[in-house]
Image (spheres, grey):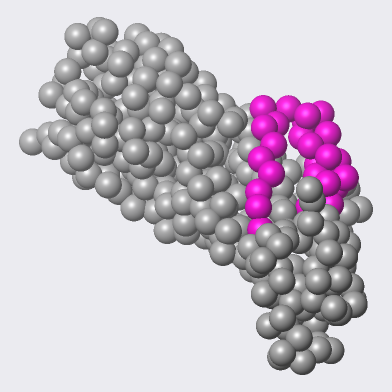
Amino acid sequence: MTITIKDVAKKANVSIATVSRILNNKPGYTKETEEKVLQVIQELGYHPNGIARGLISKRTHTIGVLVPQISSMLMSKFIQGIEQAAHEYGSSVIVCHTESKGEKTQKYLQLLQEKQVDGIVFTSEVFTQDHYQIIKDTNKPVVLLSTESYDFPIPHVKVNDRHAAYSATEYLIEKGHRKIGMVSGSRSDIIAGQPRIDGFIMAMNTYQLPVKDEWIVPIGFNFEEGVKGFSQLIDQFPDMTAVVAASDEVALGVLSAAYNRNISVPKQLSVIGYDNLRIAEMSTPALTTVSQPAVEMGKKAAELVFQMLETNVPVKSYIFPHKIVERQSVKALS
């Protein structure tokens, strides 16, 4: 049998309106009445209806999160941080897997509008005019995570991808490497693909080192693409001594492909990754990588959504610092 607010009011001998005010922390009752109602609620095991409460507060206490790849280890860390913040704010999270497909992303944005979520965290995709129009019509707070928009006034939370890739390349150069290749995301990816390539090239140019187009394989960010990308790169650049991988998953693909070719890491080839996922510690050798604090970034993005909800004031974008985490996959050359 479902216990209703009417049952609580009847047993406590108060009006339904009084119970509602107590549940929603509204004034208009005595301390004694509050204690009596709360006691009855406990005795009956009453759980307020979230939808009904949302109609009163104009909030559903849910936020939507759009992710391009649900199986990505980086996305899981972002979601972990988002859920931490949502829990602290008494809310829950709806995760939508877009597969980086424009039509699917638009459908999910419309679905979240129908679900009347309080706000949205939009992750790792190019933010388009179509996306902006849907969100503008909903008048809900939105924060971009690990992506950004120069065209629309949407706050973002991310690291500086160009600078981070520069740091990774510079680290290898400072270790004595001069023949450095890269397995990266696609050049058409203006969020993390091309910016990381730009950072790599900038570092090589800064140190007046040669860099050729065939020394960069722009292919993607997952393990399989790392395997394929390294196989192509080593054929095009057989005397390279180090590789910048655009993600830790790519770096593990590089390690696997190198092992299959009897190339010893780091004795014959040094590898640096990007993200500092847990798998970076588990690989053999353990992976030196660029760390971006993904859990903290996810938490900050959600916090900005709740901040906009509570204050109705625009928030500033947030750039997290990156750092090099040294392990065993990079060898210093004499």
Who's the residue at 51% across and 31% down the image?
Answer: 72
The residue nearer to you, when weighing 53 against 273, is 53
The residue nearer to you, when weighing 301 against 326, is 301
Judge left or right: residue 78 versus residue 59. Answer: left
Quarter of the view holding residue 143:
bottom right
Who's the residue at 60% across and 50% down the image?
Answer: 145
Who's the residue at 77% across and 92% down the image?
Answer: 30
Percent position (x, y) of residue 156? Answer: 63, 56
Q: Is residue 106 magenta?
A: yes
Judge left or right: residue 3 versus residue 83. Answer: right
User: In the rendered view of the protein, which quadrant contains the C terminus?
Assistant: top left
Quarter of the view holding residue 107:
top right
Whether residue 287 appears in this view of the structure is: no
Q: Residue furthest left?
A: 334
Q: Is residue 285 above or below residue 30?
A: above
Q: Is residue 241 magenta?
A: no
- The span picked out in magenta is 91-118
Quarter of the view holding residue 277:
top left
Who's the residue at 80% across and 76% down the image?
Answer: 12
Whether residue 325 appears in this view of the structure is: yes
The residue nearer to you, when weighing 224 against 184, is 224
The residue nearer to you, when weighing 300 against 125, is 300
